[in-house]
């Protein structure tokens, strides 16, 4: 396999899909050497079979707003690979959603799910519907309309969606309700469900908590204590909130949060009480993070991201490509010792190069944010058993999974000078398992 050649070919066949090309490039670059040790892979054209999704559904979603006006959006589901289990991955509702973004996310999800050790394939879905400013009734009508088309392509052993940007417990509930009505079954076809109808304890917390558990493993390799460390967190949604919650519990000090309008910097630290305010602000009132600054009298910077502020650790938890090369240079100049990604692909290739050159601890989302889908996998298991596990049981499993992922990254990513290249480690460990499964199942 020659990476440039594969990429050129993908760009020619699927033009105007920069996020998809970027994600494929990152993975292929780091697995090239390992892949080329297996001539049987090349003969089976494995690389194309793993880069191109099994199938993509796209459909029109029509819904009516509170004033009686009719709107149309595009809906999609990308089923990337089911070699090691049913397709599994979230639904994103955001105005920016397009096939390129969902193809990148489904591709990444496949190798992330493989890393978790649980039997899950990779997929992703979503719509360019913008949930901002919509009433609950409008959200419900949209979710129902979306599932009216999606339901025939999913199922507990086929494809199991979950939440992502713009999709939390409320939206999963509406989607699951409509699915249940159409499919006439009560199964674990969605994860992230409410606790009274098959959801798992710790699922809302899992991505943020898991990211901090992964960070702890990285810090352990350097004998660094997290206590007292100032943390730059971006986003203020699900992942950012539970990242902060765990950081606070462990005595670290989150000092920033953001949304798509700007960021806040609270030098006193975001405390448990202030975090409760953020949860209410974002989940109940759907407000803007600037209101935090008004309430607590701290700095708010509109139209910017928090990477220029002073901190010891960065945990990007908003969206893709939110740390540019120059942002990464600022982080390094400010003495940041670790970057652990809660979001998917938040660092650009230029940023990754800067962080790795500086030899700081850098964990890609594929490894560090795998806690969310891991607990989704545990939710599927509980649904199959028709049992519910205690919070402690799920949290212990989550810790074990994150530590196992870390171990695999170290195993496959340690370089000659001892530096752990977590990108390489995660990509090789995730990729090789899927590759072997695809090979064993013949040319299909
Ligand atoms: P939420 O919708 O709960 O929160 C997203 C946050 O990111 C909001 O604060 C939002 O601000 C901000 N944001 C979204 N888009 C942009 C943008 N283009 N520029 C700046 N800020 C933006 O989503 P999650 O917390 O669930 O997801 C965050 C990230 O974590 C995503 O990359 C997601 O794929 C990833 N992830 C999530 C998992 C989960 O379990 N939820 C699992 C694994 C990864 P605003 O409100 O202004 O839009």
Image: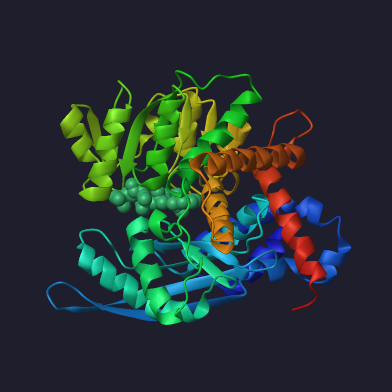
Residue pictured at 72% horizontal, 49% vertical: 429
Residue pictured at 57% horizontal, 44% vertical: 364
Q: Name above or below for residue 57 compared with residue 291.
A: below
Where does the image place residue 133, in percent across and percent down from the top left? 20, 59
Residue 96 visible from this viewpoint: no
Q: Name above or below for residue 163 compared with residue 182.
A: above
Residue pictured at 76% horizontal, 28% vertical: 417
Residue pictured at 27% horizontal, 31% vertical: 274
Where does the image place residue 388, in percent across and percent down from the top left? 51, 52
Q: Name above or below for residue 299 compared with residue 323.
A: above
Where does the image place residue 74, in percent across and percent down from the top left? 37, 75
Q: Which residue is at the front of the view, 210 or 306?
A: 210
> What is the quadrant of the N terminus in the image?
bottom right
Where does the image place residue 164, in percent across and percent down from the top left? 43, 57
The answer to whether 170 appears left or right of 52 in the picture is left
Residue at the extreme front: 387
Q: Which residue is at the front of the view, 145 or 170?
A: 170
Residue 174 visible from this viewpoint: yes
Q: Quadrant of residue 75?
A: bottom left
Q: Which residue is at the front of the view, 410 or 310?
A: 410
Q: Quadrant of residue 110?
A: bottom right
Q: Name above or below for residue 438 compared with residue 293.
A: below
The answer to whether 400 appears left or right of 386 in the picture is right
Tally the marks.
0
> What is the quadrant of the C terminus in the image?
bottom right
Q: How is the image coloured?
A: rainbow
Residue at the extreme left: 67
């Amino acid at each position: 396999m020659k990476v440039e050649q594969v990429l050129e070919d993908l760009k020619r066949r699927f033009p105007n899909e920069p996020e998809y090309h970027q994600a494929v490039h990152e993975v292929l670059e780091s697995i090239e050497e390992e892949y080329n040790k297996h001539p049987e892979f090349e003969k089976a054209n494995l690389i194309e079979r793993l880069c191109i999704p099994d199938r993509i559904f796209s459909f029109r979603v029509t819904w009516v707003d509170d004033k009686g006006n009719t709107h149309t959006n595009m809906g999609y589901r990308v089923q990337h690979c089911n070699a090691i289990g049913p397709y599994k991955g979230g639904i994103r509702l955001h105005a920016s959603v397009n096939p390129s973004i969902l193809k990148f996310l489904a591709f990444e999800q496949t190798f992330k799910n493989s890393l978790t050790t649980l039997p899950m394939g990779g997929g992703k879905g979503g719509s360019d519907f913008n949930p901002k400013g919509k009433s609950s009734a409008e959200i419900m009508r949209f979710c129902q309309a979306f599932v009216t088309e999606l339901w025939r392509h999913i199922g507990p052993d086929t494809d199991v969606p979950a939440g992502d940007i713009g999709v939390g417990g409320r939206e999963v509930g509406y989607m699951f309700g409509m699915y249940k009505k159409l499919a006439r079954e009560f199964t674990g076809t969605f994860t992230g469900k409410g606790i009274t109808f098959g959801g798992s304890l710790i699922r809302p917390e899992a991505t943020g908590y898991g990211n901090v558990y992964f960070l702890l493993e990285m810090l352990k390799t350097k004998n660094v204590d997290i206590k007292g460390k100032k943390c730059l967190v971006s986003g203020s949604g699900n992942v950012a909130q539970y990242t902060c919650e765990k950081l606070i519990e462990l005595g670290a000090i989150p000092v920033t949060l953001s949304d798509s309008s700007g960021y806040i910097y609270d030098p006193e630290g975001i405390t448990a009480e202030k975090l409760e305010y953020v949860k209410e602000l974002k989940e109940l009132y759907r407000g803007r993070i600037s209101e935090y600054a008004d309430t607590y009298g701290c700095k708010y910077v509109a139209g910017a991201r928090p990477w220029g502020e002073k901190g010891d650790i960065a945990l990007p938890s908003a969206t893709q490509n939110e740390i540019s090369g120059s942002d990464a240079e600022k982080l390094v100049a400010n003495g940041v010792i670790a970057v652990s990604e809660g979001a998917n692909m938040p660092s650009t290739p230029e940023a990754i190069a800067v962080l790795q050159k500086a030899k700081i601890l850098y964990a890609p989302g594929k490894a560090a944010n795998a806690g969310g889908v891991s607990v989704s996998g545990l939710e599927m298991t509980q649904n199959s058993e028709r049992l519910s596990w205690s919070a402690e049981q799920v949290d212990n499993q989550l810790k074990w999974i994150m530590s196992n992922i870390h171990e695999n990254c170290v195993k496959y990513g340690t370089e000659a000078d001892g530096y752990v290249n977590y990108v390489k480690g995660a990509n090789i460990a995730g990729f090789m398992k899927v590759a072997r499964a695809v090979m064993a199942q013949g040319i299909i």
